Every structure is written in C-alpha cells, then in structure tokens.
C-alpha cells in the first residue's frame, strides 16, 4: 500500500471527509467518547478527520451493525448520540392498517364492520364477484345482508354443539346457486382475490362459500383475527365462520366455547 489516503477511502472513507495529505503528522493514540483507541498507521488520516469533525467515525473502528439508537454510546455521560448516525431498519414491517377493501370492510386485515355500523351506514347489500366455468363469465352477485346473515347465524346456533369445532359437509363442499347467465347448476364459484388482504370475506360468509378458500387463505384470516389456530381445514374453516359471525354480531353466541 503506497498511499494511506487510498486505503482510508477503501475502508469506508467514501463520505469524502478524510484528508488527502498522506504526510500529515497525526497522533497514534486518541481519546474518543471516553475510549482510548490505538490507531494503526494506515488509518491515521481517518482518525484525524474524527478529531476535527465529530460527525466522522471510521466504520473500521465502530461496528455500526451493532449500533442502535435505543442504546446510548458507552461511557457517554449525557447519553447523547453521535449526530448524523441513524438506525437502519433491517426488516420492513407491514403497516397495521390497510385501505378498506370494501365498504363493509374495516382498515384492519380480515376484519369487517359489525352489523350496527353497516346498518347505520345503510349498507344492506353485499356484492361479490363469481365466475361460471360453463359460460366462462365473471359477474357480480348481490346478497341481502340481513337475511343471509340470519341464515348463517341460525344454522350455526342450531348445530354448533353437534359440529364439535369442525365445519360440516355443506361448508366444506359448498355449492352456489345456478349460473345467472347459462343456468348451469354447479359451475359457479366465487372469485377469491389473489391478494389475501383483498379477499371479500363477508361475501364468502353470506354465500356460505368460505370452503372454496385454501387452507393458507383461512389461516391468514385466523392469524389476523387473533385466533392463531392451526389444524386441519375443517377446523380452521369452522373458526373462520365463527369469527366472522362474531365480527358482525359481537354479542351473539359465536365464542369458541
Ligand atoms: Zn354460466
């Protein structure tokens, strides 16, 4: 190595603060933040920069990966941290809220408004998209909120004890009404959004077609509604029905036990 300044740049002096005069006389030992640091000759220029400019620390001497703004610098009497140094977030955390995906959905994932809110907002019809394999068409279907929820809730109340925390056959293998276009009886399915946050949970509940969801999609729902349940699909499916009914009617008999 013929030039000290070149080495400094290679060691992290890219901020351009390191002096370029290789002949400058520099101390071999400095006191920095209460520490006495022994300086190898090759890094003297960078250390000089540290003395002259407290924003400059040669990364070679400060393991910045371990640095956290929550922890004051060691031996720092007033706990202040070095200006110009910020914590780097290594993991991008997902925001807690999302834009509501439907008029009946809240800004929380997998969460719909209770019936009281929907009534006060005059939301009486819940719409969802379906696809008919026979005529290869996608179109919207509208469901009456009150009467369809009453169907699900009554079925659940009357059969809950016999279900043993498992979805019954008609929920595991749901059928939709005949196609509105071609009248074919068994080729219509709800369109389930690829992005889980955009799944139309209320439409699936009211049409009793949550069984078309994959286990992964149902687990997503349980994860975001604090159910934190795992298990076979009929178990997670049952929990999803129960939790959605509870969201709509928080006072109803929709607790797990
Ligand atoms: Zn059709």
Image: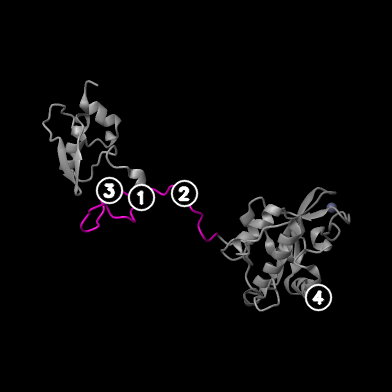
Q: Is residue 90 visible?
A: yes
* Range drawn in magenta: 69-98
Q: Identify the residue under disc 3.
A: 84
> What is the CA distance from the residue labelled 2 to the residue labelled 1?
12 Å
Please state which of residues 29 and 140 is positioned toward the viewer in this rendering: 29
Q: Residue furthest left?
A: 25
Q: State the SS at label 3.
A: loop
Disc marking residue 108: none
Residue 69: % across, % down = 33, 54
Marks 4/1: CA–CA distance: 56 Å
Quadrant occupied by the N terminus: top left
Residue 155: image location, x then y, percent: 80, 72
Furthest-top residue in this view: 2
Can you tell which mark lies on residue 91? 2
Q: Which mark is residue 158?
A: 4
Label 4 Cα crowd, 10 Å radius (few <14 / some 14-19 / many 20+): few
């Amino acid at each position: 190595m013929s030039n000290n300044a070149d080495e400094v740049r290679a060691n992290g002096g890219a901020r351009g603060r390191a002096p370029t005069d290789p002949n400058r006389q520099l101390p071999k030992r400095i006191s920095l933040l209460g520490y006495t640091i022994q300086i190898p000759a090759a890094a003297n220029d960078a250390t000089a920069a540290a003395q002259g400019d407290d924003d400059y620390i040669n990364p070679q001497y400060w393991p910045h990966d371990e640095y956290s703004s929550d922890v004051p610098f060691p031996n720092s009497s007033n706990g202040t941290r070095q200006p110009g140094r910020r914590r780097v977030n290594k993991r991008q955390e997902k925001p807690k809220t999302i834009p509501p995906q439907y008029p009946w959905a809240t800004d929380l994932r997998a969460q719909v408004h209770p019936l009281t809110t929907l009534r006060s907002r005059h939301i009486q019809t819940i719409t969802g998209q379906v696809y008919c394999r026979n005529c290869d068409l996608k179109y919207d279907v509208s469901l009456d909120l009150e009467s369809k929820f009453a169907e699900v809730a009554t079925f659940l109340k009357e059969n809950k004890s016999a279900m043993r925390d498992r979805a019954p056959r008609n929920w595991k293998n749901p059928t939709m009404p005949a196609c509105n276009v071609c009248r074919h009886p068994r080729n219509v399915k709800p369109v389930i959004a690829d992005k889980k946050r955009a799944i139309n949970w209320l439409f699936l509940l009211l049409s009793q077609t949550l069984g078309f969801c994959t286990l992964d999609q149902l687990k997503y729902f349980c994860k975001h509604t604090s159910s934190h349940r795992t298990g076979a699909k009929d178990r997670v499916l049952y929990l999803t029905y129960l939790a959605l009914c509870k969201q709509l009617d928080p006072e109803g008999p929709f607790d797990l036990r």
